[in-house]
Amino acid sequence: MKNRDKTIALTLLALILYALFVWRGMTTTQQSITLDRDMFAGLLNMPTPEIESLLDTQPGQQSNDAQEYKRSQEGFYQFSKIKFDVTGYKIVKYDGKYNLAYQFTWENTSNEPVDFLDANVCINAYQDGIECDLGGVPSIDPNNMTKIKPGKRLVSYYVIELKNTKSKVETHISEYFVDKKPITLNVDVQYLLSKKK
């Protein structure tokens, strides 16, 4: 095998390993696989500090000294490109299944047009420790791909399909590639259903 072919093969292997780490959401406390950063940097022909910054900002990764998101006086959480708050919840039955819609009011705090998805918002919702699937309700327009200019506000929705109508929904909201503790919300499904009657 020629040196060039060997380098390409090793580079592809290194990229596959990195993709697996990202996909698995490895945290700094998981020690099941140890990666020699200098070796990895050599394979990609990059300086070690650049590799370290790549490996230290995987989605789902959080160091022990991660900070919390701060909430402003007006009730908004500040992310890198937006500030937002969860301003409402709605239970909607569609196709025989119950869905929970989160209403987000958000403002673009960057200096370029962004949509809610551009802001790298990561939302995970669980009932009884099991992650809920993404829901879909035709009567609710998520409005999360509409770009807005800096300083403008918009209301967007995120919909999940509930596993049941009894258990609370534990929701974690964070930002991809940012080392901060997720915002945790507990939504009382039974209370929301009782308000509908």
Image (cartoon, rainbow, N blue to C red):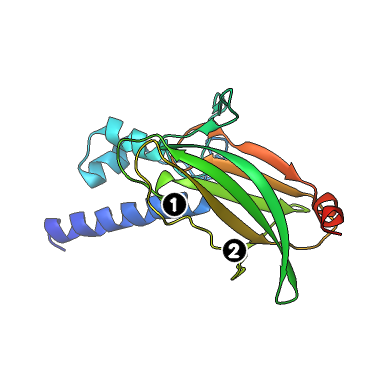
Whether residue 165 can be seen here: yes
The residue drawn where x is 37% and y is 51% is 147
Residue 4 picture location, percent across and down: 13, 57
Q: Quadrant of the C terminus?
A: bottom right
Front-most of residues 12 and 90: 90
Secondary structure under the numbered disc 2 in the rendered image: loop
- Label annotation for residue 95: none
Front-most of residues 187 and 76: 76
Q: Quadrant of residue 181?
A: top right
Q: Determine the residue located farthest toward the bottom in the rendered image.
A: 95
Residue 17 picture location, percent across and down: 39, 53
Mark 1 touching mark 2, by CB under 8 A?
no
Label 2: how many Cα within 10 Å (few below 14, some 14–19, many 20+): few
**Image vertical order of residue 165 relative to residue 154, above or below:** below
Residue type at mark 1 is: Leu
How far separated are the C-alphas under marks 1 and 2? 17 Å
Residue 114 picture location, percent across and down: 36, 46
Residue 78 picture location, percent across and down: 49, 31
Secondary structure under the numbered disc 1 in the rendered image: helix
Residue type at mark 2 is: Ile
The residue drawn where x is 20% and y is 58% is 8
Q: Quadrant of the N terminus?
A: bottom left
Q: Nearer the viewer, mark 1 or mark 2?
A: 2
Label 1: how many Cα within 10 Å (few below 14, some 14–19, many 20+): few
Read off the residue under disc 1. Answer: 117
Which comes sooner in the sequence, label 1 or label 2?
1
Left or right: where 116 falls relative to 188: left
Read off the residue under disc 2. Answer: 140
Front-most of residues 176 and 165: 165
